[in-house]
Image (cartoon, rainbow, N blue to C red):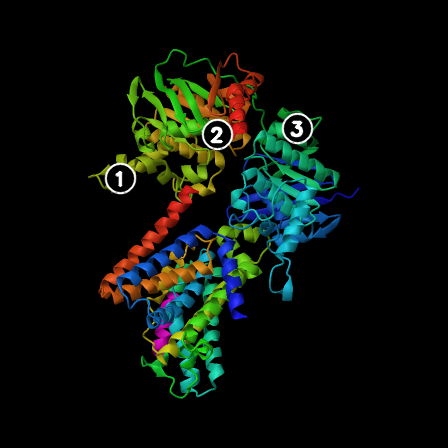
Amino acid sequence: MTVSKLLQGIKTAAFSSNTRQKLLAFASLLGLLIFFSMASPSFMQTDNMVGILQATAVNGVLAIACTFVIITSGIDLSVGTLMTFCAVMAGVVLTYWGLPFYLGVAAAIFFGALSGFISGVLIAKLKIPPFIATLGMMLMLKGLSLVITHSKPIYFNDTPEFPLIAQDSLIGYFLPELPIPNAVLILFVVAVVSSLVLNKTVLGTYTFALGSNEEAVRLSGVNVDRWKIIVYTLSGAICGIAGLLIASRLNSAQPALGQGYELDAIAAVVIGGTSLSGGAGTILGTIIGAFIMSVLTNGLRIMSVAQEWQTVVTGLIIIAAVYADILRKRKS
Amino acid sequence: MTPLVAITHLCKSFPGVRALHNARLEIVAGEVHALMGENGAGKSTLMKILAGVYQKDSGEICIDGQPVEIASPRAAQALGIGIIHQELNLMGHLSVAQNIFIGREPLGRMGLFIDTDKMARDTAAIFERLHLNLEPHTLVSDLTVARQQMVEIAKALSFDSRVLIMDEPTAALNNAEIDDLFRIIGQLKRHGVGIVYISHKMDELKRISDRVTVMRDGQYIGTVPTASTSMDTIIGMMVGRTLLEDERPPQAGQGGEALLEVRGLNRGRSIKNVSFTVRRGEILGFAGLMGAGRTEVARAVFGADKKDSGEIWVKGRRVEVGSPADAVEHGIGYLSEDRKHFGLATGMDVQTNIVMTSLRRFLSFGFLLKPAAIQGAAAKLIAQLGIRTPSALQKVALLSGGNQQKIVIAKWLVRDCDILFFDEPTRGIDVGAKSEIYKLLNALAAQGRAIVMISSELPEVLRLSHRIVVMCEGRVTGELSARDATQEKIMQLATRREAPAAASGAVAAAAF
């Protein structure tokens, strides 16, 4: 079921639009994989591959959240600290209040959606530019996380199920030689569902339409403000899922974490071919973008390149990816 | 018979402006009703109120004799009022079908997913009704402007519109496309749709409309049957004064020095061996159909596009023009037909726009702006060109098309350009402002500049040019003096296709 859905999602995404850019991104990913496997024998080992998948999960989910917003030609700088805030809220519900496991999960997603909703209202109703509105939200959420936790991590020691969300391996039960952690599974489920939403539903159509020509959508009699708020709310809810993933992996909510994640997420979206001016983009592209970033980090680390230089290379890749996109557009 | 739509005593004010005052309009089923007036007369405002984009302050709108409130575009759609805005409002990244059904996508399974098949089928059905050969899945950005317009019409019709408002629908269409549009309008009329048609092109109104309502300064002036009313009367109603329709240019510029000479210009398939000369004090008209290559020639001479070959001589000296910066250096200026995109920073003020390209001249110590000098230069040009603006610090976006065009002209005058290419200088500008632009062009020529004017409106070319170069399919097919030129002669040259080349092309195609 999941696999066929996955294939369907990939198909939908691959043939919807912008196929060439994704081929380019995909080719770069393959190129990186081949390069690193030749450069270091330990790169291609299962452990390392699983590590890469694991490392992509959080950034991948955040990047999907950003993809929605960026296609509307908006931007969301708050995804990183929102992720942390959601993790903290799960901690408050589970550890501070001792409520049942599922309420902690619901709390993370609820507060993600709530924060996205607030961003959406600020942008759609109060007409605050997305960059500013989400910059404000980013700082507020960061501060709130620190205030709520008194700047100390919250551990999930009372909820043994919690770390299993990301760390257990459902696939591993069926295929013991392939212990892919659930975090990766969740990333792919989020990706497939998001891809369906983007390509098959009214919400998806409006997401593209808003980025393509917002005034035209308004004049078509569509309630533009409402749909914009819905897009930001959905994006926030997805950040809540990312919050669960990172908290589960660390078995704690780390209130100081989060800032900087938004830029990695936006980078993945851009590398994946989504246009920052809106109207075009795919989930598959974003996922490939997220993998390019983690393969790069992992590969360079295996080759013992200093972390400082890894950052430099990531920057170069972002510029190269966007320039490739410009070249492609100029040609067509 | 009850009129389909009856608008009476409609008033609307915007901050600082009274846009409509006692506006009136009556539309009956099956008529094409032209709405005319200079820019700023309130036509678009009136139509936007009818389409639910703006709300009226007071007055009454009746549909089938029943007073209605139109609170939103959606409410207007429900009442059967469709509008095709002046600027096309489509989403380029979306397909034709998605554009047509935006806001009311048919839902399929579980009410979650869009029923794309149904959407495509319904779209195809609408196209069939219009006898349009269009594929529902095509991306709108892949269509020509004319086809995009057809999509807009199809969209408006998909609401079962009984009233269809078209705001300057032919602004970007060529003659064949206009014929196509008029054929569709004819069909709609037969189906009993009432059409409001806004356009500045007089000949079109004569062809298509049954009645004309004229507005001036937001007020209702009168409604007349088109067939029995002369153009001059209608123009008189619009401007409140009579305009001289036919002013031939004074014979001038004959013996002047050749300021610009272009020899053997080539660029791909769009420019083929084009040569011409413009003299001091002369207006050289460039006539031809859309796509004849006139704009391409101007852009190549200006260095905006790379030329394959050809020489450019300025004042008897051969010059290299590799970029617009080179062109400006040699005193060549180009005023694009698309003012908003290429000519002006519409969000900035008048004064800044005027000096924008020549800021170097307003610096002290090479980096400090001299505000007094800028104000002085701007004030001088505002007075000289008669730019109507409350102040030099007014945002350009708030001015009318005619005044915006004058600001673009002012920009080039500050740069001391002697050779000016005007590309469709009066597009989208109302009748009154047009004649001011004409006067300005004449004055610029009389001051010893050389003007090249590209225009698709033949009366305009005939009225202004001392000489007329006619192009067809990238070649110059003839040159006429102002005295000999007639619309017929120009059209003959403009449609003179390259018969032998076309034939050999066909053979070559057949050989493959």
> Is most of the magenta stretch helix, strand or loop?
helix
Query: Separation of disc 1 and disc 2 at Cα?
Result: 34 Å
Q: Which residue is mark 1?
A: B370
Tell me if A54 is positioned left or right of A196 in this view.
left
Three-letter residue code for mark 1: Lys
Callouts 1 and 2 in the same chain = yes
Chain of the residue where label 3 is placed in the rendered structure: B
Element marked by disc 3: helix
Query: Which residue was labeled with disc 2?
Result: B424
Instruction: Point out residue B300 in the picture as x, y percentages from the top left corner.
Output: 39, 29
In the rendered structure, the answer to whether residue A187 lies left or right of residue B289 reads left
Report the residue at 29% width, 55% height from top. Answer: A316
Among numbered discs 2 and 3, the one appearing first in the sequence: 3
Instruction: Say if A152 sits above or below B234 in the image.
Output: below
Q: Secondary structure at mark 1?
A: loop
Q: Position of residue B13 (x, y in %)?
A: 56, 47
| Label 2 residue SS | loop
Q: Given contact means CB atoms under 8 Å apart, are the residues at marks 1 and 2 in contact?
A: no
Which chain is mark 2 on? B
Q: Which chain is disc 1 placed on?
A: B
Q: How many numbered marks appear? A: 3
What segment is highlighted magenta in the picture?
A: A136-147
- Mark 3 = which residue? B206
Q: Residues within 10 Å of mark 1 (few under 14, many from 20)?
A: few
Is residue B42 in view from this perspective?
A: no
Q: Is residue B51 above or below residue B400?
A: below
Gap between marks 2 and 3, in whole Å?
22 Å
Q: Amino acid at mark 3?
A: Lys
Q: Nearer the viewer, residue B337 or B97?
A: B97
Give the residue drawn at x 78%, y 44%: B2
Amino acid at circle 2: Glu
